[in-house]
Image: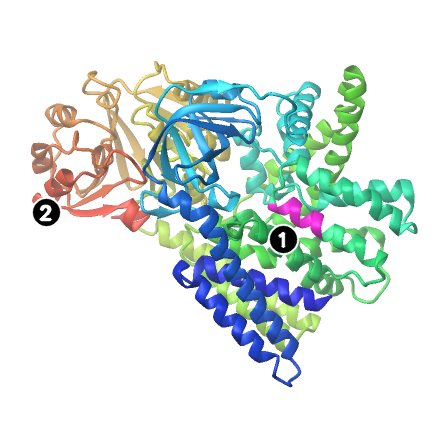
Amino acid sequence: MRKLAVLCCAFGVGIGLGQWLVPTAYWLWMAVALFAVGCVCTLHKGKYRRHMVLGCCGIALALGHQWLYHSLWVAPAQNAVGQVLYDTVMTVEDYPTAVTYGAKVEVSVTLESGQTVRAMYYGDALLLEAVPQGTITDTVYLQSATVIDDTEITTFSSKSIHLLLYSRGDEVYTPPEGTVYAPLVLGQAIKTLILDLFETPYGGVVTAILTGDKTLLSDEISTDLTQAGIYHILAVSGMHCSFLLAIVVAFIGRQRSRLVALIAIPMLICFAILVGGSPSVVRACIMMVLLLIAPVCNRQGDPITALSVALAVILLQNPYAIASASLQMSFAAVAGIIWVSPKVYGLLVGEREVHRVWQFIAMNLAVSVGAIVFTAPISFWYFGTFWLVSPISNLLCVAAAGWVFAFGLLTLAVGAISLPLGLIVAWVPSRLIDYILAVCGVLGRLPYHAIYDANPYFYPWLLFCYAMALVVWRWSRRRRSVCLAMAMGGLTLIAIIVAGRWSMTSARVDGFAVDIGQGQCVVLESNGMTAVCDCGSGNSWVSAGDMAADYLQTMGCYSLDYLILSHYDSDHISGVEILLHRMEVATLYVSTLETDTAMGISLLEAAAAVGTKIVAVSELTQLPFGAGLLTIYPSVSESSSNDSGITVHCMDGDWDVLITGDLGAEAELALLEQYPTTNVDVWMVGHHGSDTSSDIDFLRTITPKVSIISVGDNSYGHPTAAVLQRLMAVGSNIYRTDLQGTVHFSN
């Protein structure tokens, strides 16, 4: 079966080459050339002739398949970008979900070229009433789902979506005629039953574990699971499929392999369809199906072949799926479990007889370490985090998550017959969830439970560890060598933690304009005291609260002295609740306690709930701050929500930082009249570089030596050319978070 593994692995390599290295225009020509090379290799008489032929043909097939897929689906979508389709009819393919400004749903739409493609449609909140196979008639604007504002993204294309449709008219929804696609209806019915049986927040957790749908999870629970390094238990994967298989084996018996395969294979396929066919569950199902078929066909089951075939099947359906972080993490984890975990288990247990408890612990640790070895680089690349507590959290929680799945299924079965009895059975998985969340809450709050990319020395350390592991694997696999390598890794880890903390807090005052996209978040530190000025992003895919907490915890700060919010716009406060959840905040300073925004009301309630003192700034307020002084200026204008914001002035002798939020030009001048300020060293440019701020007279007065613009992906044109010209006119050095990333300034 390894010949099949070689072919499928080569196919995966070819898909990767096409997605990341080879330009689209060369796909077909390279496919032809490699196929020709494969034919020539058949004449080779060497030992590896078959592998060479299979490798060349696999890569050739991958490039050719990508070219065909691109020609049929991607190119027509790209050619339609920028068009407006009037009164077009779209077929709903899934249940809609709510977004900030309405709702979105996956649809299929026929383009002017006659090609039907899948797209994501954005409409108003009435869209939430839609069901699969219904139709929506609307005038829509077509935008690329692969390139947005000159930035390539893979979120949609990895799910076979290459167009975004935005409503430009009055949408008309028509319910479906006849029977709706049964798996989707059944899946929705299961989610509804779960919410009937489980109270908040247990319903969201059970829904995620049983179906993989995480939309009902609270941000706090998601954060706890993430910080403990076990968010993966919510991904429907091998654990779920193994339990389903165990149920079949328990009823039929392990010896009747043909009957087990006959019943388990359709069950696994139905389960994969029911939960939406995510890469992790498709991978798990394909692997199990192949391993079930192998003994029936008198063949030896081979996990490597099963894994490579699963990858090829997924990429055949959509080559762009290889860019999915979930696919990469899923396959890397299983590869690590296959290749690394047995060796780790052998080192932990050896050849002697050991107690069953130690066997259980050793097995769980081996699986965790094996998965981490292969997924750590991917995790750090996408998420900027390496969870040191992950092996412990996996040991303590993965088995409990399996029991939540088991008792969750039992609760559904009982609840479908009798809702009152189902409510009684639901008590068991609810208590298990309490246990998991309690463990995550403790582990996720341990000092240095994780390392973040805010630490400038992490990448070199990671490379050092992998180089050391490679040396041990290649030249010496004895237990003593492994222990020595682990000790060196641990000592160097301590060294980079100390060095990273020192590099971020060695000055009298250190500040970071954190790159959180279109928003603002400034972290200040002085002699162990910390403050965060604003914490929000207008980009929904950015968690400003997590990023602020990451920087603070990398500094060694696990509590915050001051959290200062200039005003209640979402791009300045959207991350506050997560920040309040991740660390203790002593005092919150706001412009006013009166706000009509739902997000503002929610964050004030969250702050009060955790015991944070809330102060509305109505007069000049001075706060001790390490080696310096923090001054908060109250609102100087009531003309708008932006102009009514408060201003922060951090001073250390003659050095200072001025943060004016979104004050407009008139408010900037009013600020100078009431609180004269000149010769500013660092200025956070007002309103992200909007032309309505940064008045030239204001700039000539404060004459900032350094101007930092906190800006990201936006449709407002920030920063404007006029503002950039004004800053250059006063001789200010300009830094932008969208170009330079997080900006570190210090005195």
Most prominent secondary structure in the magenta stretch?
Answer: helix
Residue 627 vs residue 397, the one in the foreground:
397
**Which label belongs to residue 313?**
1
Question: The residue under label 2 is which amino acid type?
Answer: Gly
Residue tagged by mark 2?
A: 731
Q: Secondary structure at mark 2?
A: loop
Q: Amino acid at mark 1?
A: Val
* Mark sitting on residue 300: none
Residue at 52%, 26% (x, y): give it. Answer: 96
Query: Which residue occupies the extreme bottom position in the image?
Result: 45
Name the quadrant containing residue 406: top right
In the picture, measured across the screen, residue 420 lies left or right of residue 130, that is right
Q: Which residue appears at 77% of the width and 21% of the height?
A: 416
Q: Are marks 1 and 2 in contact (CB under 8 Å)?
A: no
- Label 1 vs 2, first from the N-terminus: 1
Residues drawn in magenta: 279-286
